[in-house]
Image: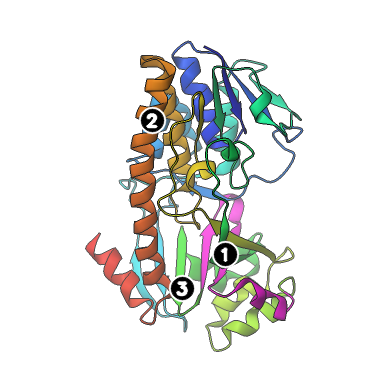
Amino acid sequence: MRVTIIGAGLGGLTLARVLHVHGIPSVVHEAEESPTARSQGGMLDIHDYNGQIAVEAAGLMEEFQRLVLPGRQAMRVLENDGTVLFEKADDGSGGRPEVQRADLRQMLLDSLPAGTVRWGSKVTDPGVLETDVLVGADGAWSRVRPLVSDARPVYAGSAFVETFIHDADTRYPATAKAVGGGSLFAPGKDRGIFAHREAGGLLHTYVEFHRPLEWFETFDVTDPVQVARHFEGWAPELRSLILDTDTTPLLRAHHALPNDHRWDRVPGVTLVGDAAHLSPPNGEGANLAMLDGAELASALASSDVETALATYEKAMFERAAKTAADTEVTVQSLFGDDAPQKLLDLLIDA
């Protein structure tokens, strides 16, 4: 069986690794020149009901545990005046340990035979590749997706403005205290401030706005002062996450595919991760991509190609649709008229 994977993200690499565990070779084409060609983003919480299942299938749980950052499952919810509304410590028993995305990706790369990933290999016309199985693991703007679907991502109505503060405990102790040992949520109507404590005292912040895309053209999103003006009256320690950034704020618009995105079976071709079910950030994207990869590999190892692809897609479609519906509920809890009370209700009921 010849398996060709487009994209060396977490989904594509998990697919390649689990195939390798089952004795099936694969080739991964990646347009980037090397694993370090660009930043791989911040932390990920890898869940015991999807992402960790993929890690187990890959035979890498021991390696994964070594990557976990202790204490990062702690969580705080703050009112915009800085009042602590909810706090949960990390006692080590939670099912969502946090790891750095770059470390997780490197773990998967290290587990593959040399030469599996072909760096600097940009595939512009995947339809001409000679292979038994072609898998699009190439993200939001997938070049493989048009082989199975006419759907294209559209702006989802929200965007992050991303900031970073280094050595926060020493330089900005009040800000570091507000974030706590793990994650901070400070939601409000149409906007919010969310932050992670990452490795080495780094505070990674996502300032989220629910606005039309054209609205971001009305001010300079690269200017921390102009971004912070939209949080007048919020606690100084929260506004510090914007104003005291060590990097130029970066706008990241969110795009999505239809919640019910699916396609008719196309012989020998399928998709995993964001290529199949892109949605706004919901804490599940990396987990779903890894589980997609693991389940597809296991299906290919246990039956003929077309049966395997049909089995994989049926389960994946159902899982993605449920996650999309859950995401809409979460968004309302974070940015609706009565935020943050709905978020508190969700956390208390969990």
Q: Could you say which disc has been placed on residue 206 in the image?
A: 1
Query: Could you say whether the residue bearing mark 3 is in a helix, strand or loop?
Result: strand
Residue 261 at x, y percent in the picture: 44, 48
Q: CA distance from mark 2 to mark 1?
A: 34 Å
Verify CB contact (< 8 Å) between mark 2 and mark 3. Answer: no
Count the labels in the image.
3
**Image location (x, y in percent) of residue 305:** 44, 18
Disc 1 marks which amino acid?
Tyr
Q: Which of the 4 image quadrants contains residue 325?
A: bottom left
Disc 2 secondary structure class: helix
Q: Residue at x 27, y 70 (%)?
A: 345
Return the disc, 2 or 3, that comes first in the chain's sequence: 3
The quarter of the rendered structure image containing the C terminus is: bottom left
For disc 3, the marked residue is: 186
Q: Does residue 326 appear to the left or right of 66 in the view shown?
A: left
Q: What amino acid is at disc 3?
A: Ala
- Decide whether residue 342 is among the magenta residues: no
Q: Is residue 298 visible to us here?
A: no
Disc 2 residue crowd, few under 14, some 14–19, many 20+, Cα 10 Å: many
**Residue type indicated by callout 2:** Tyr
Please report the bounds of the magenta region as a residue range: 192-220
Residue 161 visible in the displayed image: yes
Of callouts 3 and 1, which one flags the residue occurring earlier in the amino acid sequence? 3
> Which residue was labeled with disc 2?
312
